[in-house]
Image (cartoon, rainbow, N blue to C red):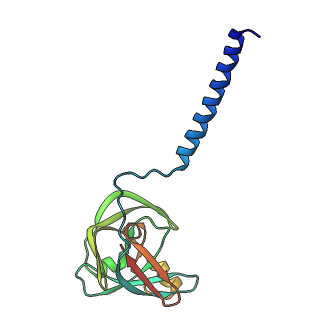
């Protein structure tokens, strides 16, 4: 073997050795957690209020609340599958509310139909007022008949997405947290 061949073999050996060290070095660096200089830390959730509920057969949750400054306490079903918040048409008429007719449609168990809205309303629980809610109006007389309780509306995602809600079936309370 000549000196030239020996030098080539030594060069290949060094390249392999350097490559192995680089691969191992990068692997080690990847396993070290790198922290940014700044990190936002979310504060712990804060209890806003605790609201009692009634549980009907089938797990249906009925919560009581008031609409705006009206004195009547209304019964709302808590429905995680509903996208908005709604008020029964008979309740709206009884409270002398003036819904705005729209071209918007909803799809529910009764099919697809156009709905009217009460815009920018408040829903009041003891210790919590929820602002800027757009209630669509729907006929819930069938729900009142089925459950044997007056159903004035349905609370859905438009309220659920604003809070952390803890449902305690043992105490029949719902905690609202932010």
Question: Is residue 12 or residue 48 the one in the foreground?
Answer: 12
Q: Find residue 140 and report its horizontal and vertical position in percent.
A: 44, 76
Question: Is residue 2 or residue 99 the one in the foreground?
Answer: 2
- Residue that lies at the very extreme toward the left in this rendered image: 69
Q: Is residue 140 visible?
A: no
Instruction: Name above or below for residue 142 compared with residue 149.
Output: above
Q: Quadrant of residue 66?
A: bottom left
The number of callouts visible is 0
Instruction: Name above or below for residue 86 compared with residue 127.
Output: above
Q: Is residue 83 visible?
A: yes
Residue at x-position 41% and y-position 83%? 63
- Residue that lies at the very extreme toward the right in this rendered image: 1
Q: Find residue 178 and report its horizontal and vertical position in percent.
A: 35, 72
Q: Find residue 144 and report its horizontal and vertical position in percent.
A: 47, 83
Q: Viewed as shown, does residue 55 lie left or right of 94?
A: right
Residue at x-position 53% and y-position 83%? 146
Q: Viewed as shown, does residue 103 lie left or right of 98?
A: right
Question: Is residue 81 or residue 128 the one in the foreground?
Answer: 128
Instruction: Name above or below for residue 43 compared with residue 39.
Output: below
- Residue that lies at the very extreme toward the front in this rendered image: 3
Q: Find residue 2 and report its horizontal and vertical position in percent.
A: 73, 8
On the rendered image, what quadrant is the N terminus found in?
top right
Residue at x-position 41% and y-position 70%? 160
Residue at x-position 27% and y-position 81%? 95
């Amino acid at each position: 073997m000549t000196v030239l061949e020996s030098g080539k073999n030594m060069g290949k050996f060094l390249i392999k050795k350097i490559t192995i060290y680089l691969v191992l070095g990068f692997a080690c660096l990847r396993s070290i957690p790198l922290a940014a200089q700044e990190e936002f830390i979310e504060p712990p959730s804060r209890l806003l209020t605790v609201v009692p509920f009634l549980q009907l057969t089938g797990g249906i949750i009925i919560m009581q609340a008031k609409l705006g400054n009206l004195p009547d306490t209304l019964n709302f079903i808590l429905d995680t599958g509903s996208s908005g918040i709604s008020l029964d048409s008979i309740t709206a008429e009884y409270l002398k509310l003036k819904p705005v007719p729209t071209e918007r449609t909803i799809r529910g168990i009764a099919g697809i139909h156009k709905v009217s809205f009460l815009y920018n309303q408040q829903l009041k629980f003891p210790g919590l007022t929820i602002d800027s809610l757009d209630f669509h109006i729907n006929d819930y007389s069938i729900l009142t008949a089925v459950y044997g309780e007056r159903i004035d509306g349905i609370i859905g995602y438009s309220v659920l997405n604003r809070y952390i809600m803890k449902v305690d079936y043992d105490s029949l309370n719902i905690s609202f947290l932010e």
